[in-house]
Image (cartoon, rainbow, N blue to C red):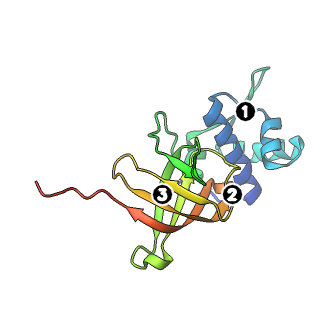
Amino acid sequence: MANIELTSSQRAALTALVNEHDSTGEPVKGEVIAEAVDRTPGSVRNQMQHLKDLSLVEGLTGPNGGYRPTPLAYDALGREDIDDPQTMTLARNNRRVDVTVDGIRLTSVHHPEACRAHVHLQESFTEFEVGDALAVGPTPVAGLLLAGVVEAVDESNNEIVVDIAQLEAPVDGPD
């Protein structure tokens, strides 16, 4: 992962750019980023200039222009530029949510009462709130299922922290 120190406003602008670019595949206008991060377009232009200087963003001119993240941008955010992401079900309060989960990090598995799951999403989200019931899985490779309650929401990093109530993995019987 790239060792680039970003301010919170730079990280928010870069995350908004990457999220929008991933959902459309097109260059992203500064006004769209400004709306996503609740800043003025002028402020976003300044942020984008700094991010261009760091080689995280490309600026495209013309009527269809805007900004496009570089591969280094994904690296700086700790994300992968996934061409064909695997999907898994994520449900909030027993209703399916269409998002792409690109990682789950478990903490304190040796202490089940303190175990948390950090669920990282590929795109931005607004529908999750602390206290929501959440279920994720099965994961594509391991078939892991987890359920719990949302403990924290970090929109700037596209991450949801879940207090795990149930964690299941398939058990293969003896051959």
Q: Residue furthest left?
A: 175
Q: Residues within 10 Å of mark 1 (few under 14, many from 20)?
A: many
For the residue pair 17 and 42, the one nearer the viewer reads as 17
Q: Is residue 63 left or right of residue 56?
A: right
The image shows residue 109 at horizontal and vertical percentages of 41, 73
| Vertical relation: 162 (above or below) 19 | below
Determine whether the residue tagged by mark 1 lies in a helix, strand or loop.
loop
Position of residue 163 measured from the top left corner of the image (x, y, whole percent): 54, 69
CA–CA distance in space, label 2 to label 1: 20 Å
> Quick one: 51 or 31, which is closer to the camera?
31
Element under label 3?
Answer: strand
Mark 2 or mark 1, which is nearer to you? Answer: 1
Q: Name which residue type carries label 3.
A: Ile
The CA span between labels 3 and 1 is 28 Å
**What is the crowding at mark 3: few (fewer than 14 residues within 10 Å), some, or many (at least 20)?**
some
Residue ID for mark 1: 28
Amino acid on which the number 2 mark rests in the picture: Leu
Q: Dot 2: within a 10 Å radius of its alpha carbon, few (fewer than 14), some, or many (20 or more) residues?
A: some
Residue drawn where x is 59% and y is 60% of the image: 133
Residue 6 disc label: 2
Rendering coords of residue 10 (x, y %): 73, 53
Tag on residue 167? Answer: none
